[in-house]
Amino acid sequence: MIPLYWYVLFATALFCIGLFGVLTRKNSVAILMGIELMLNAVNVNLLAFWRYLYADPTVEPTRGLAFVAIVFVAASAEAAVGLALIISAYRRRDTVVAEELDLLKG
Amino acid sequence: MPIQIFFLIVAAITLISAVMVVTVRRMMHAALWLVLSLFGVALIFALLDASFYAVIQLIVYIGAIAILVIFAVMLTRRVMDDDAAQTNKNWWVALIAVLVVFGGIAATALSWTRLQVGPGIPPGDSILVDFGTALINPQKYAIPFEVSSVLLLAAVIGAIYVAVDRKGGKG
Amino acid sequence: MNSFWADPIGFVILWFISLLQGWGLPGDLVLLISYVVGALLLATGSLLLVIFLIWVERKIGGRVQDRLGPNRVGPYGLIQPIADMLKIFTKEFITPDGADKLVYNLAPILSVGSVIMIWAVVPFAINLYGSNLNVGVLYIVAVGGLGELGIILAGWGSNNKFALLGAFRAVAQLLSYEVPMVASLLIPVMLAGSMNLNEIVRAQTVPFIVMAPIAALIFFISSIAENGRAPFDLLEAESEIVAGFNVEYSGLKFGFFFVGDFLHAFTLALLFAVIFLGGWNGPAADSIPILGFVYLMIKTTIVYFLGLLVRFSLPRFRIDQMMALNWKVLVPLSLATLMLTAIFDKLAPAGNLLVQVIVLVLVNLIIWLLLQEFLARAFRDKPQRRAVLHSRPQADAAEDAPAQPQTDAMQS
């Protein structure tokens, strides 16, 4: 039997590793990979709570599933647009390093 | 007992691949480690009796988003890219901040007694049918469903518009 | 049910489990060992089947093309695949300079592994299946995505611009043809009410090829395209960008791609038989499971034979023709069929199978006629501008002058 806090700790660890990737990496595509890890951690968290509260009569049983569906859709849309932006920026500026994309710097 | 060992192994594989994603030097290897960690997350979904989402994770994340990431890595590659430093200079500040965040959330989670419970009744075979009817039920989740489809349409159109190579345009 | 002749495979499984329990192992370990052995046997069996498939393909291909096929090595050329295997095993592995070793070696493994993984969910008989997955149809689509990942890794890991280009085109084709394949797979799922392949087989009192023929046709075409066989074989044809993404692979690594290709063809024929032709359904298949397996194999070989005929008869598509076929014809057709089948399946009175079948057949017929009309209009040749034939003064003057200067030149 796996208690719920195992899944919550796992999701938190995955989220923090993704956060570390976003804060630390230079390459924009690597930052996007960190964002994908964070979204996956959120999905694990949502599904863990859905599963463990499934027997609870006050909770509607498909609510967690609907949440996860919306997170999947949002993650896919964001990955597609983000990568399109990165490729377009690479064509204009010939770099994907996030530090060097600083045209708006005052 | 065996299911706990299985969970520990899968969680270890996923977390180690996630650490590899954020630390390896070559971007292609980072993308492959990302595929492995997404696969590990799919196994965790299967452990949570959400087999539908395990397979959707395989299709959407590994079959589409990971391939998109690999394409982006291939298309934005310069000659001497992978030999330069891949992390920012003050990465230890980020490490401390992340450890603080993790410690805070972990301490809070461990102090809630409601999180010590085990799983209750497993979802029956009709959970997919119930989910399907809930997604189109106007009282339940029809509106988020339709809005998310509009979001996907906007993302598709936006991505095409941003990434199309306009010859002779601004550049 | 336990007699050896009616159900040999089930009999052997039960004997094996009782043998392991007789050795005193705990119940969980027995289950784990039986799962592992079952998976190994399934994978090995499918790979051994490929040896026979190579011979079948070359022999039938030869006959379709009015030649004999291999007939030197062994009676009727039956040992030819063994000779091919020996040749491939003994070739040297040449890894290109600068290739990313991890990526280069991972690609063939993913490519073959993703095909064998499909065999885990196929129901071979009433009680013979690898895994009773509730989302079996989605699992098949997901595993196809892993195969595409293998192709990209092959193109990238070869450190070769042409391999990379070939991999890009291959992935473009595979990702595009996944859309009509998934949409046409949804129609039998709708008609059966479940994504479980066992349930789909059980729900086919009337085979789904009768109730959804257009979906079957779309699935057939897009499965040939997903596989990369002719006429969609510009992924790997020798004249297309130096054989595509697997140009830098030699020896057994190329053999992996080769085996994966052949096994994928058979696997897709197997899926077509399971989903559209009724799987192991047939007379007396419920009580004698081995007969169900035999029926499934017969149906699969019929579909595989059809695929072979298509392969050896049709010329190859260009990539723009292929993309036009997919996005302009197959995707709208599959989505329209999906919507209309959903609507009319609900409108037909439930419980009356004959009326349901007739309604669906009529709907499919109407869609087919509309499709013919649309294709005739859209792809009609544009009327050519008539060439205006007015006289050309220079040519007329040359006509009047006889051919004398030329004969003078020839004489001198």
Image (cartoon, rainbow, N blue to C red):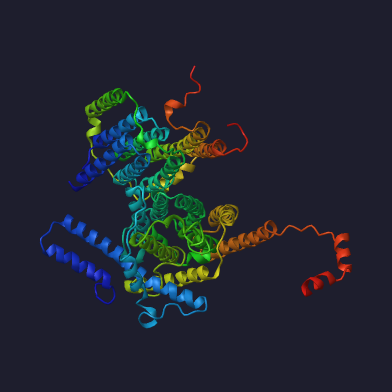
Residue C61, how many percent across, how many down? 48, 74
- Image quarter where the N terminus of chain A lies is top left
C29 sits to left or right of B106: left
Q: Nearer the viewer, residue A68 or C409?
A: C409
Residue A59 visible at all: no
**Quarter of the rendering containing residue A23:** top left
Q: Nearer the viewer, residue A66 or A32?
A: A32
Q: Residue at x 53, y 57 (%)?
A: C345
Q: Nearer the viewer, residue C31 or A18?
A: A18
Question: Compared to C142, does C406 lie above or below?
Answer: below
Residue B131, how many percent across, how many down? 42, 44
Residue C123 visible at all: yes
Q: How many marks?
A: 0
Residue C352, how many percent across, how many down? 51, 63
**Quarter of the rendering containing residue B104:** top left
Residue furthest out toward the left = C24
Residue furthest out toward the top = A106
Q: Residue at x 25, y 36 (%)?
A: A4
Residue furthest out toward the front = C412
Residue C409, how many percent across, how many down? 79, 70
**Quarter of the rendering containing residue B110:** top left
